[in-house]
């Protein structure tokens, strides 16, 4: 499948991301009630509304495609599909609740298990990040489109690490020290953190608790097209539309220039 085949898909994904973002903003800073799906997994009416809006839009536009979203039941029919939409309707719910602005709408299309298209939209700032296979990654803000390119920092010790504001684990701190990294930027939302690496504003993102396909697929598409590398903590490539969508083991997203060295350091730390 060639890159121009995704033009319509990109238009639909961007439109739905913006629509969902506009609706999410209506709920923001309103003292919304918070439910929990499990331990430390908050969910709000904004999550559910955005999920319904995006799901309905994708199913109407692409009825033959599979669909995997965070807030909808997974009937596994997607496993029979070559093309599967993978959606996190509100990535960074904890940040949405804490009113930090660090949350995003994420819509991705995986083809044969690989990210072919990704959209990450930050509603508060109206920043739209998107990427299409073989066509590059871009940031659209204030009506201006800028192509994304990862940084050229090759020494891990000189890198800026972007890490979770709310899930900064002991392992990540130990890894930071082992790599000699001094600069750390704490941000919410997986999409926004990977977006900083894709933009060259940071050089490396490490996470131990990121594990779900809807967290990863859209940001993965962005970073690939910006010239970066994404693996799990073991250095293995990520594959999407698996029977268990939460089976990934952490995340290493980098500019690619010292990725193997970083993974080797993590392996040593894990063995200890």
Image (cartoon, rainbow, N blue to C red):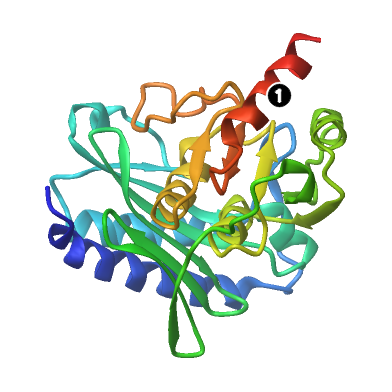
Q: In this rendered view, identify the residue nearer to me: 197 or 60.
A: 197
Instruction: Name which quarter of the figure residue 123 lies in.
Output: bottom right
Is the C terminus in the top left, top right, bottom left or bottom right quadrant?
top right
Instruction: From the top left corner, tell me how far across and down residue 41 is, in percent.
Output: 68, 40
Q: Is residue 130 left or right of residue 99?
A: left
Residue reaching furthest bottom?
Answer: 143
Q: In this rendered view, identify the residue nearer to me: 76 or 10.
A: 10
- The residue lying at 78 percent from left, 41 percent from top is 167
Q: Secondary structure at mark 1?
A: helix
- The residue lying at 64 percent from left, 55 percent from top is 193
Label 1: which residue? Answer: 266
Check the image and report above or below for 105 versus 164.
below
Q: In this rendered view, identify the residue nearer to me: 71 or 111.
A: 111
Check the image and report above or below for 25 versus 120.
below
Check the image and report above or below for 150 versus 234.
below
Q: Is residue 82 left or right of residue 20?
A: left
Instruction: From the top left corner, tell me how far across and down residue 227 is, in percent.
Output: 44, 52
Check the image and report above or below for 199 versus 181.
below
Instruction: From the top left corner, tell me how far across and down residue 256 is, in percent.
Output: 53, 43
Instruction: Name which quarter of the figure residue 241 lies in.
Output: top left
Q: In this rendered view, identify the residue nearer to me: 94 or 209.
A: 209
Q: Is residue 70 visible?
A: no
């Amino acid at each position: 499948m060639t890159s121009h085949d995704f033009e319509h898909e990109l238009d639909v994904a961007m439109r739905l991301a913006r629509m969902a973002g506009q609706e999410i903003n209506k709920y923001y800073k309103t003292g919304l009630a918070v439910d929990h799906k499990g331990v430390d997994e908050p969910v709000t009416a904004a999550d559910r509304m955005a999920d319904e809006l995006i799901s309905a839009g994708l199913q109407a536009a692409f009825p033959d495609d599979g669909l995997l979203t965070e807030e909808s039941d997974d009937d596994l029919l997607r496993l029979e599909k070559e093309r599967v939409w993978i959606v996190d309707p509100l990535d960074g719910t904890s940040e949405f609740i804490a009113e930090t602005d660090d949350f995003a709408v994420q819509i991705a299309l995986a083809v044969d298990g690989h990210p072919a298209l990704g959209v990450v939209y930050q509603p508060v700032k109206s920043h739209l990040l998107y990427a299409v296979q073989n066509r590059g990654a871009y940031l659209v803000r204030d009506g201006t489109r800028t192509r994304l390119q990862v940084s050229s920092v090759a020494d891990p010790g000189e890198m800026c690490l972007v890490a979770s504001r709310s899930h900064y684990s002991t392992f990540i701190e130990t890894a930071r020290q082992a790599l000699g990294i001094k600069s750390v930027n704490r941000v919410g939302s997986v999409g926004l953190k990977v977006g900083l690496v894709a933009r060259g504003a940071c050089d490396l993102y490490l996470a131990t608790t990121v594990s779900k396909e809807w967290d990863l697929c859209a940001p993965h598409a962005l970073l690939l097209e910006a010239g970066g590398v994404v693996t799990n903590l073991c250095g293995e490539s990520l594959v999407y539309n698996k029977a268990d969508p939460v089976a990934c083991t952490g995340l290493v997203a980098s500019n690619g220039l010292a990725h193997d060295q970083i993974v080797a350091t993590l392996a040593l730390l894990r063995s200890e």
